[in-house]
């Protein structure tokens, strides 16, 4: 299944201002192009919830005379489903770094022109982003942000932080577990749980162990969620107590609602990601790169971090100067990013040995035929 949404509901959103630095005139230098040409060539984004809020887009459109059309997706599998269907012809694709090779092979993305995005200078120096976002030594994208996919739990009920993915299989939580609908990012977590040597290069025996564990997990799961809001609603209603966290945005959303949501980094390792920003062959236009450069500005990144609780790409110092409080920084991973113990727990996604096999296993799981 796919979901094609050009906007998500604006009524539940609230624009977040960070001082006077977010005034359109200050943040965005207008693009020098005719309004007619801009109207004929809107920028279409294949994107995710919380990346491109309607207020921010309207602000940028007004300053630059170019329409932005976000198409919201909720899983990495859906990225490819949308592109292969031809229903969406984006200029920009936001997708995890491990998908760069697959996107390039499919002809869906083109080499990234780094010279047109000078704001990459704002990226956290310790973030090794060029290697994951390159294919055959060719840079295919830049990071919008990075993060972890930890074990999420309701701390009012689960008093002690779980230290292992095994908690998801604990019978006392049967019917109270969530995972999200994405083979690409869920199967590596299962692989870590079963002790696979490399969660992205499974042997036949390890594939068997992953399949068995996934089959056993099915009776534990209350719901397979799609999208951040879906997951947050399940926890807010009390239907779920713990699960594989789609994004720490979910935990931060629940905190804003007054719920005692927390997350832990299991001892087996925590799947982690770098969100790539890719440009399609159709998107190789100056105005597209202008938009991407603006999204890499300190002002845009800080607002994005403040709104979503995302790590963004900024250093702690830059984030503080842009208006983020210490409490807001504590809701991200960036304060921990230089801690060797933290870094050693992270398992960054890579292209797996057999994408189609993993998707088939996942589809069988969803259908109950695994």
Image (spheres, helix red, strand yellow):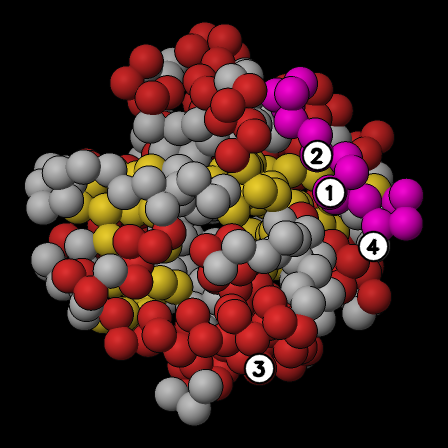
Q: Give the residues in magenta.
A: 123-138
Residue 164 in percent (x, y) is at 36, 46
Residue beneath label 1, please? Answer: 132
Q: Is residue 30 above or below residue 195?
A: above
Q: CA distance from mark 3 to mark 1?
A: 25 Å
Name the dominant secondary structure of the magenta segment: loop
Residue 212, given in percent of the width and then of the height, sits at 45, 75
Q: CA distance from mark 2 to mark 4?
A: 17 Å
Residue wearing tag 3: 360
Q: Which residue is mark 4?
A: 110
- Distance CA(mark 4)–CA(mark 3): 28 Å
Does residue 75 sit above or below 96 in this rendering? below
Contact flag, marks 1 and 2 (Cβ < 8 Å): yes
Q: Secondary structure at mark 2?
A: loop
Q: Are marks 4 and 3 in contact (CB under 8 Å)?
A: no
Name which residue lies at 84% across and 50% down.
Answer: 135
């Amino acid at each position: 299944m796919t979901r094609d949404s050009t906007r998500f509901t604006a009524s539940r959103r609230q624009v977040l201002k960070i001082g006077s630095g977010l005034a359109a005139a200050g943040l965005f230098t207008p693009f020098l192009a005719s309004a007619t040409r801009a109207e004929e060539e809107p920028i279409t984004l294949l994107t995710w919830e919380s990346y491109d809020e309607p207020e921010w887009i309207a602000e940028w459109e007004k300053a630059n005379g170019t329409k932005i059309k976000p198409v919201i997706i909720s899983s990495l599998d859906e990225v490819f489903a949308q592109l292969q269907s031809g229903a969406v012809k984006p200029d920009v694709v936001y997708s995890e770094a491990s998908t760069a090779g697959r996107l390039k092979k499919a002809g869906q993305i083109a080499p990234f022109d780094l010279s047109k995005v000078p704001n990459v200078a704002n990226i956290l120096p310790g973030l090794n982003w060029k290697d994951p976002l390159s294919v055959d030594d060719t840079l295919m994208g830049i990071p919008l942000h990075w993060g972890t996919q930890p074990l999420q739990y309701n701390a009012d009920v689960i008093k002690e932080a779980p230290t292992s993915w095994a908690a998801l299989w604990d019978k006392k939580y049967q019917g109270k577990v969530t995972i999200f609908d994405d083979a690409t990012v869920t199967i590596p977590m299962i692989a870590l749980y079963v002790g696979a040597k490399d969660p992205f290069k499974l042997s036949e025996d390890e594939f068997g162990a992953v399949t068995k564990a996934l089959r056993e997990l099915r009776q534990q799961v209350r719901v397979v969620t799609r999208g951040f809001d879906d997951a947050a609603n399940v926890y807010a209603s009390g239907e779920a107590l713990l699960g594989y966290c789609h994004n720490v945005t979910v935990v931060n959303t629940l905190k804003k609602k007054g719920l005692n949501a927390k997350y832990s980094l299991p001892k087996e390792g925590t799947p982690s990601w770098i969100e790539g920003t890719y440009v399609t062959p159709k998107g190789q236009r100056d105005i597209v790169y202008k938009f991407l450069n603006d999204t890499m500005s300190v002002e845009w990144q800080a607002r994005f971090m403040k709104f979503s609780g995302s790590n963004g790409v900024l250093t702690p110092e830059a984030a503080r100067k842009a208006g983020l409080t210490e409490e807001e920084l504590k809701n991200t991973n960036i304060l921990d990013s230089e801690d060797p113990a933290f870094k050693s727990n992270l398992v960054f996604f890579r292209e797996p040995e057999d994408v189609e096999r993993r998707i088939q296993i996942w589809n069988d799981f969803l259908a109950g035929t695994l």
